[in-house]
Image: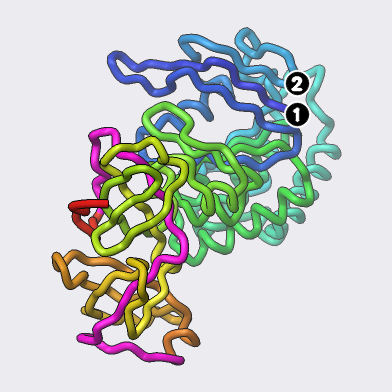
Amino acid sequence: MSIAIRALSKRFGPFTALDNIDLDIQAGELVALLGPSGCGKTTLLRIIAGLENADAGQIQFNGEETAHRPVRERKVGFVFQHYALFQHMTVFENVAFGLRVRPRARRPGEAQIRAKVEELLGLIQLDWLADRYPSQLSGGQRQRIALARALAVEPQVLLLDEPFGALDTKVRKELRRWLRRLHDELHMTSVFVTHDQEEALEVADRIVVMNCGQIEQIGSPQEVYDAPATPFVYQFLGHINLFHGRAHSGWVRLGELRVQTPEYQNAESASATAYVRPHDIDLLREPEDGDTTIAAIVSRVHILGSLVRLELRQQADDELAEVEMTRDRYAADPLQVGDVVFAKPRQLRVFLNDGHSPELPVWLGDGDGI
């Protein structure tokens, strides 16, 4: 089932939860709504489900308006963060619940219910727990049961609100891989809310990055990570370093570094910020000609499994930066605390400032000239 969202807005008193949202979700797609707390992602999910009413705008399922369609007729399955299982019912009865409460005319027979529940418990690989109660299950098992219960009513759209947020890191990683495999098998239109960037990048076909009730960017995981459309997306997806400087006539001066930016050919000494990910910086033992490197001192070395993270202090103004590299790359030239290095960004993105400085650690101060 495809979902079309048009000019959707929602306020709670003076607070704007959603501000003129437009979004298309294709049939069979797994879409992540990603953003910080309070950005509107859960409100959007609840309006799609019919659990909240929008103040303005439309939501269409397969081209049909849903505003006057009751929740039970939307054919939507909803999975909450905290399972919402019935504690007095067995696993089997929890999964069967949605089928048993259907109107009599559409209620399956007992044999059909049993066959459907057994099929779903087999699908989530928990058929051996059918006679247990929720209190006897682990958090990961309970969440899989909650998902089976949502699937029992054969929804055309599956909505998940922070489905793994209450679980520990190891279980969360296991379940999100399992969810991706399950989706590939069922091909059901699915929308899930998360504030976990890694979760969205690993699981989703497309990511909708939200902030302050608006959509900042829509794209595949690779698109939103490799080509962030706004400073907010850059900050929210992964670690970054900030270089502050000035743009003028197609060039940006960032402290010792000078970078060509033809997109800002008409800028005249405009305040600018360059965003650089830690893994997009090379460290050299000697400077290069042409204002392409920045002198710094290694202040700390962290070995984190297969990754090495180095903290640098720029010699000019003592600001911090982070550089990440593989263990193999580090082993080829093992830098030590106190070593002088010359940082060379391989890839950076420059945005002109609008008067609001990003609230992140700054590596470079403003350049005095171009």
Q: Are marks 2 and 1 in contact (CB under 8 Å)?
A: yes
Determine whether, in the image, residue 68 is placed left or right of residue 17: right
Secondary element under disc 2, as helix, strand or loop, is loop
Q: Position of residue 116 (x, y in %)?
A: 80, 42
Q: Neighbour class for label 1 at 10 Å: few (<14), some, many (≥20)?
A: some
Q: Which residues are magenta?
A: 332-360
Please identify the residue farthest to the left as the structure is shown: 317
Provide the major secondary structure of the magenta segment: loop
| Residue at the spot 37% in from the left edge and 53% down from the top edge | 275
Q: Position of residue 338 (x, y in %)?
A: 20, 86
| Residue at the spot 44% in from the left edge and 51% down from the top edge | 237
Q: Amino acid at mark 2?
A: Asn
Determine whether, in the image, residue 159 is placed left or right of residue 353: right
The residue carrying mark 2 is: 62
Who comes first in sequence, dot 2 or dot 1?
Answer: 1
Q: Neighbour class for label 2 at 10 Å: few (<14), some, many (≥20)?
A: few
Secondary element under disc 1, as helix, strand or loop, is loop
Depicted 283 relative to depicted 92: above or below: below
Determine whether, in the image, residue 257 is placed left or right of residue 306: left
Tell me if residue 351 is in the magenta stretch: yes
Q: Amino acid at mark 1?
A: Met
The answer to whether residue 176 of the structure is visible from this angle is: yes
Numbered mark located on residue 1 in the image: 1
Q: CA distance from mark 2 to mark 1?
A: 6 Å
